[in-house]
Amino acid sequence: MYWESLLHSARKRIVQTLLIGAGDYGLSFVFQAQRTPGLRVCAIHDRSIERGLAAFRHAGLPGEAIAICESLGAAQAVLQAGRVFVTPDPLLPMQLPIDLVVEATGSPEAAACHAEAALQHGKHVAMVTRRRILSSDRSYLAEPGAQA
């Protein structure tokens, strides 16, 4: 009975998500999120605005549902209208009511900066990378399959 109550509550809640990095993983994440009840990617940051737009389009969103936002006010208006946005500023969406930041840039240095900012803004963070960090001081990074 308690389990049923938890599941019912979880189905009502939608986790608002910022994706940082719209590469291969990001593209598949946005696509899958569109088909996952309770998960919504409402913002994407990528160094390439076009790649962020393409990720939303690949997931099946129509062009009119996607905006490019460079200011906090514009981003707030887009979210209030139920639309999604792409931004050149990874910190801008962290000022909004977003629950989860998925960091998928593949850059350990950028990932550390994004995660720190997200945590400072009270967001949950999911780190996604193909790289393996072997030292906490980042002095030795190895690609998967490399000899240590």
Image (cartoon, rainbow, N blue to C red):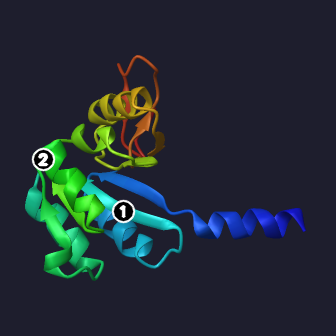
Pointer 1 local density, CA inside 10 Å: few below 14, some 14–19, many at least 20: many
Which residue carries the number 1 mark?
41
Horizontally, residue 33 falls left or right of residue 109, namely right
Q: Position of residue 81 (x, y in %)?
A: 26, 67
Q: Position of residue 53 (x, y in %)?
A: 15, 67
**Residue lying at 37% horizontally and 24% vertically, measured from the top left:** 140
Q: Position of residue 66 (x, y in %)?
A: 18, 69
Image disc number at residue 88: 2
Residue 121 occupies quadrant: top left
Residue 65 occupies quadrant: bottom left
Which SS class for mark 1? strand
Q: Position of residue 123 (x, y in %)?
A: 45, 39
Q: Spot the residue most to the right.
A: 1
**Relative to 63, residue 83 above or below:** above
The one of 132 and 70 positioned closer to us in this rendering: 70
**Residue 125 appears anywhere in the view:** yes
Which SS class for mark 2? loop
**Kind of residue indicated by mark 2:** Pro
**Residue lying at 29% horizontally and 30% vertically, measured from the top left:** 109
**Residue lying at 39% horizontally and 47% vertically, measured from the top left:** 97
Q: CA distance from mark 1 to mark 2?
A: 16 Å
Residue 72 occupies quadrant: top left
Pointer 2 local density, CA inside 10 Å: few below 14, some 14–19, many at least 20: some
The one of 138 and 40 positioned closer to us in this rendering: 40
The one of 51 and 66 positioned closer to us in this rendering: 66
**Residue 128 appears anywhere in the view:** no
**Kind of residue indicated by mark 1:** Val
**Relative to 44, residue 90 above or below:** above
> Is the N terminus in the top left, top right, bottom left or bottom right quadrant?
bottom right
Which circle's residue, 1 or 2, is located before the other in the chain?
Answer: 1
